[in-house]
Image: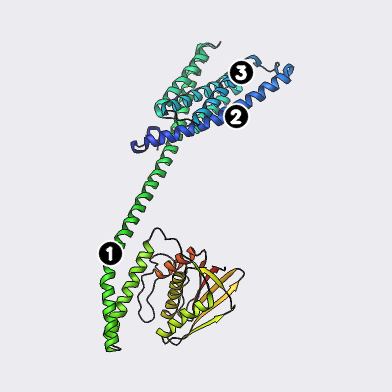
Amino acid sequence: MLHFLTYRTPPKFLKAFDEYAADGNLNFVKIISSLILILGVISRTLATVFHQDAIKIQGYDQLSLNNWFQLTFSAIFFFISINVANKQVPLRYKKIIVLAFVAFFLTSAFNISYIISLHNTKNTLFVFLVGIVAASLFFAIEYKYMKLLVIYIVLLYFAATQFSALANQQKIVNFMAGIILGMVLLSFSRYSYYFKSSHFVQIRELEEKNIEIAHLNTQKGEILSFVAHDLRAPLNNIEALSQMMLLEKGEDGETKMIYSSALQAKNIINDLIEAVRTSQPELQKETFELNPYLQKIIHKWESNTDRKIIFSQGSEHLKLSANASKLERVIDNLISNALKFSAVDKEISVLASKVKNKALIKVKDNGIGIPSELQSHIFEQFSKASRKGLQGEKSIGLGLHISHKIIEQHEGELLVNSVENEGTTFTIQLPLV
């Protein structure tokens, strides 16, 4: 529970935290010294303007002397902190400046408390306690330096009581009070140091983990690219040979299955490479009319399937600036999914329309739909929403993830609206030229 009292910054992060803490401490030196300077100037101005009233305050001479003490040293520390912040100063000098300022700050707080206590014993320690709390919480100071400050405070308190007109018994009580205040300063400062250091260490450990993960991701992508490159060659050969056999023998069930399997394997490899790619190449765009472009894609599908695909257009002239091949990949994937998850007697609809300055491409089916609990996961990589088609078609859960990435590259959106057992509509929104 009191681990913070003996806490030490791990050696691995000690140097980095020392630099971080020193800069943070110097920033607080600048802020607090400027506040003390402003308050000191205001106090001195008021004392000058209302001099006759000010001199009636109990302990005015001592308070006035302390005011000059504050003005002088706060100005010195303010200008030092500004100059040090803009220069490459050795770490030990930064620590000395911070240590000296905290000693000045605590001395100033003690002086005010001591002067007030000479005339009003009810408020003896209030200002000094505020100074101790502020110094311990704002500044992250190492244990060995904080011990010096604690010793300084105890000696300062002891010296003040020795030169006061108090009975020996009261001097002993005050000396014990000084020791207690020193312990309070040490405890608060250790907790502050522990909190700031442990927080810094956690952030650095997270940064290291992120770098390690990024490195592993890069390695994974490189390995997958090598594997894919080696697998593509034999798959290309299988595809070419099976295609030649189909041309020679005509419709042959086994040969057709070999051909479609090779083609499916190539598509899976391409999807895997696309999914793990960390940097996307610059998107090469061209301007084209959307409706003829969609008609060409649908005609291709109609020539390769017996399924009915209905195309309708709400506006004749819709111009897009896009990468035609990548966009075709998205539309192919959406049509493929629509066919995969709807019965053979159900038609597929493709609609092109315009809303404000955006083109909408909708691919609608009347199939099994997507369960509501899976809809938030369908665009994830290797999505758990991946399912087999109605004819047993397999999926690795990358198609919609890649489609979503491609549409994002085009500064568009890919949206889904689905009701289970009623159908699904995917909507592509792209900016018009």
Residue 68 has which mark? 3
Secondary structure beneath dot 2 equals: helix
State the residue at coordinates (54%, 70%).
Answer: 320
Number of disc labels: 3
296 over 378 or under it: above or below: below
Q: Quadrant of the rendered structure where residue 243 is?
A: bottom left
Mark 2: few/some/many CA within 10 Å (<14, 14-19, 20+): some
Residue 35 has which mark? 2
State the residue at coordinates (49%, 25%).
Answer: 181
For the question of whether residue 232 can be seen, the reply is: yes
Q: Which badge, 1 or 2, comes first in the chain's sequence?
A: 2
Q: Which residue is mark 1?
A: 227
> Residue 178, position in %: x, y?
49, 21
* Along the line of sight, the residue nearer the viewer: 214 or 373: 214
Q: Quadrant of the rendered structure where residue 355 is?
A: bottom right
Q: Which badge, 3 or 1, comes first in the chain's sequence?
A: 3
Quadrant, the N terminus = top left
Image side of residue 388 versus residue 241, left or right: right
Q: CA distance from mark 3 to mark 1?
A: 77 Å
> Residue 212, position in %: x, y?
34, 50
